Amino acid sequence: MNRYLVAFVKGAVVAAIGLSAFAAAAAAAQDYPTKPITLVIPTGAGGGTDLVARVMQKKLAELLGQPVVIDNRAGAGGIVGNQFVARSAPDGYTLMMSSNQFAIISAVNKNTPYDPRRDFQPVAYVGLIPTVVVVNPKVPVGSVPELVAAARAKPKGLQFASAGNGSPNHLFGELFNRMAGVDVLHVPYKGIAPALTDVVGGTVSMAFASLPTVQGFLSTGQLRAIAVTSAKRVPAVQHLPALAESVSGYEADIWLGIWAVGKTPGSIVQKVHAAVTGTLQDAEVRRKLGELGVVTSPMATSEFEGLVSAELAKWAKVVDDSNGAIEKQ
């Protein structure tokens, strides 16, 4: 057979196979979902992200028409779970719910085993978990201006506890130091529970912690809250001023979102986004999330993509501007 004809035939076969594969992938995306969906949580069971996921699980499965199986994959500050998702097939059957720890991990780790922009597709914003500034009741400050004045009067005289180097509450504290022009000493712990225990005990002065983790201590008077870290006051604790009311421009939120694997077909992304939106509009889900202090608000996929991109840039700058206070791992 003429070698040009052979080449033509081979090319036609390859093209036909490619078109067939494309058609099969398009059909699969159109029929999605046809089997259970795994929702990876890159933290342990019982944490804030896990609790929110379990509130949403039943309704989300109902709207998607398939079971949603929660898979907790904790480790390395979230890297273990993130890496598992990044290496999964981009078919919509492996999703991830995470906080903005997703962005912070990339800021404090020079060599994550995945690319946070290329290997993940932001799908849907879930909501904000208020973070509050809490102090031991014996610390003689009752407001942010008093806290700033005390910290300026005696550098390193006050301390803030965190869940560990590079954790959100660590970076929230360092951002406060930089923007308020103070030097509150960071004291890292292996988790937020032991950190708060020492704040309650008076070993450490204060902490930046999510509302669900400190509600019990606040109700018993073991801790005193003086502000929220959001740009504005939040409904769950409307009586607390925003830290930004005293430190202009300060904003540091813990928010939750859902990601798919990078290069997941757009039609699948939109189906999941619609299901998440519907779940968050359900009255019972909203009630339960409200009890956890979660503030939900609708956000288009493109808006969520913009938020993720902005957070990646923001926390990278916070780390770079910390003059070594936040050590890159």
Image: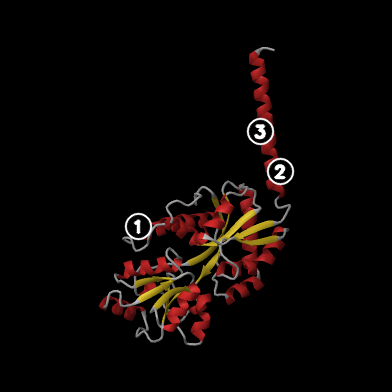
Q: Secondary structure at mark 2?
A: helix
Residue 26, compared with residue 315, is above or below; it is: above
Q: Quadrant of residue 44?
A: bottom right
Q: Residues within 10 Å of mark 2 (few under 14, many from 20)?
A: few
Q: Nearer the viewer, residue 217 or 200?
A: 200
Camera-side mark, 3 or 2 = 3
**Among all residues in the image, which is located at the extreme left?**
153
Q: Which mark is residue 27?
A: 2
Residue that carries the numbered disc 1 in the rendered image: 320
Q: Say what amino acid the circle numbered 3 marks.
A: Gly
Residue that carries the numbered disc 3 in the rendered image: 18
Classify residue 64 as left or right of residue 90: right
Q: Secondary structure at mark 1?
A: helix
The residue sitting at 72% across, 60% down in the picture is 67
User: Could you tell me how far apart the alpha carbons at marks 1 and 2 are, in whole angstroms?
Assistant: 46 Å
Residue 125 appearing in the image: no
Classify residue 29 as left or right of residue 248: right
Residue 57 appearing in the image: yes
Mark toward the start of the polypeptide (3 vs 2) = 3
Q: Nearer the viewer, residue 249 or 163?
A: 163
Q: Quadrant of residue 299?
A: bottom right
Residue 31, compared with residue 46, is above or below; it is: above
The residue sitting at 37% across, 57% down in the picture is 317
Residue 3 x/y as whole percent: 64, 14
Q: Say what amino acid the circle numbered 1 marks.
A: Asp
